[in-house]
Amino acid sequence: MKLLGPDAAVFDAWSGGTAVNQAHGCVRYATDGHWLHGCATLDEAHFEGGLQAASRQAYADLFAVLAASPSPHLLRLWNHFADMNLETGGIERYRQFNAGRQQAFTAAGRSAFVGAPAACALGTSGGPLQVYFLAGPQPPLAIENPRQVSAYDYPTRYGARSPTFSRAALAGVGGARQALFISGTASIVGHETLHLGDVRRQTEESLANIAAVLDVAASRAAAPWSLQALTCTVYIRHATDFAAVREVFECVVGVHSAAAREAVYLRADICRADLLVEIEAHGFMPNRSPT
């Protein structure tokens, strides 16, 4: 994905321990005893079943890693693959990916529905299937958005197999801290895309959905979550929309907020061809007893 902003490379550093690098199947990963972070990488050209089969295998290897780890609980997933909205064999590639992912969850005895981890799926300009993941020793608390139908309950018009993710995940992350991982969030209310062709309105709606998730998270965590304090990644379908999206984003979160200062903007395809922007986020705060 092309970095649209900021001008310099960026990264997150969450671990204070010494990481040990390991591998299993297509998965390369590192763990410090609490966090487990890795990536499953596969070339779908090597699979007779294409992207669906590759997705199923990538997740099978990922789940094998987790099953042998003291950090077996998925907190967050990032799925990247090329030509997301292209149809092959009469089926959109994003839907093929969803089918393989759900099959792997079911085969591993993991919930593909209620309680699924936070996640996003973005389309790249090329390259292999890559599934990045973050896991921990305790299961997260799944958060849904009252403004939206849960993704795993979408009607079949969006594909025979529904997407496997929750709108957000709340998790203890050690050091008396908790984290909120917000899945890729777009201009969807109920299950319908809103503001077709209007990137500014879609950005506003995406941020309204994140605000709704924060309200639910605050009630579950017994602590307030601030949009202005989140670290956000903004995915934009058309690079020419970058200035407009950033202007709306900074207007909503405040141009001098931490969210505005730390936001990362990337050029990417999004799970529906009519979606122009998607925003994911995460944040940390002192740990309190979640309800």
Image (cartoon, rainbow, N blue to C red):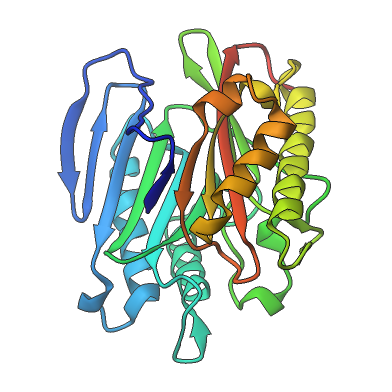
**Residue 235, x across and y down, in percent:** 52, 50
Classify the position of the C terminus by image quarter.
top right
Q: Viewed as shown, does residue 101 lie left or right of 28?
A: right
Q: Viewed as shown, does residue 147 lie left or right of 70?
A: right
Q: Residue at x 83, y 49 (%)?
A: 147
Camera sees residue 171: no
Classify the position of the N terminus by image quarter.
bottom left
Q: Residue at x 78, y 32 (%)?
A: 216
Q: Quadrant of residue 271?
A: bottom right
Q: Quadrant of residue 217?
A: top right
Q: Viewed as shown, does residue 114 lie left or right of 3?
A: right
**Residue 145, x across and y down, in percent:** 76, 44
In terms of depth relative to the viewer, which is nearer, 279 or 201? 201
Residue 24 against residue 188 in the figure, above or below = above
Q: Residue at x 65, y 25 (%)?
A: 255
Camera sees residue 236: yes
Q: Viewed as shown, does residue 191 lie left or right of 121?
A: right
In terms of depth relative to the viewer, which is nearer, 288 or 94? 94
**Residue 27, x across and y down, in percent:** 24, 49
Q: Residue at x 19, y 48 (%)?
A: 24
